[in-house]
Amino acid sequence: MSFLDNLENNLKALESRDQGGMEDHRQRNANKARSLAAAPWADLLKQSPWTQTLFRDVTRAGHQRRTKVGLIWIGTTLRLEARGHRLELRPGSDGITAVFVDDGVESRSVAADLDSPPSALIDLWMPVLDAQKRLDDERAAQAQSEGEIVAD
């Protein structure tokens, strides 16, 4: 390889690395801007009495169904988990979005209204958990009956 070919290859490599660096810089700036826009909503979600009421009411609703509901803060996102299903409250620049996640796939999302009782949101999520509980109970009964047949 000649000196000029080597120089040209080095310049091309530098240009491609710089373009990737610029893209990373743009992406970091966009993430920072989103975080700054969502910050007031995140603070409101963490400090609101609505959230405490949500904790209390969703725990009661789960207890009535003999289902443990896990409450987890991941950064600014509040995640409620039960029976393999999640309800995530995600602050954004235009408010808080409640995202329903079933088996790792987002099934739907609705705007969370902190001015209305959290029971409306709980009432949307609990039928999903009820259906999952029925499926789990049916599978358990089937496994038990198959176990009894094998044991006889």
Image (cartoon, helix red, strand yellow):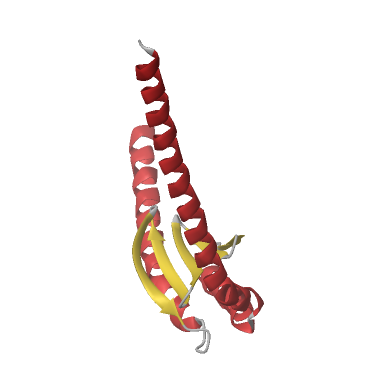
Identify the residue at image location x=37%, y=18%: 4
Q: Closest to the observer: 68 or 42? A: 42
Q: Closest to the observer: 110 or 140? A: 110
Q: Is residue 99 above or below residue 143?
A: below
Identify the residue at image location x=64%, y=78%: 52
Q: Residue furthest front?
A: 4
Q: Closest to the observer: 42 or 107? A: 42
State the image quarter where residue 144 is shown.
top left
State the image quarter where residue 45 is shown.
bottom right
Q: Residue furthest bottom?
A: 115
Residue 99's x, y, as percent?
Answer: 42, 67
Q: Residue furthest top?
A: 1
**How many circles with numbers are drawn on the protein?**
0
Q: Is residue 41 above or below residue 140?
A: below
Residue 13's x, y, as percent?
Answer: 41, 29
Residue 6's x, y, as percent?
Answer: 39, 18
In the rendered image, is residue 123 in sight? no
State the image quarter where residue 14 is shown.
top left
Identify the residue at image location x=38%, y=40%: 148
In the rendered image, is residue 135 in sight? yes
Q: Quadrant of the C terminus?
A: top left
Residue 104's x, y, as percent?
Answer: 39, 52
Identify the residue at image location x=59%, y=82%: 50
Q: Closest to the observer: 48 or 127? A: 48
Q: Is residue 150 above or below residue 117?
A: above
Q: Quadrant of the N terminus?
A: top left
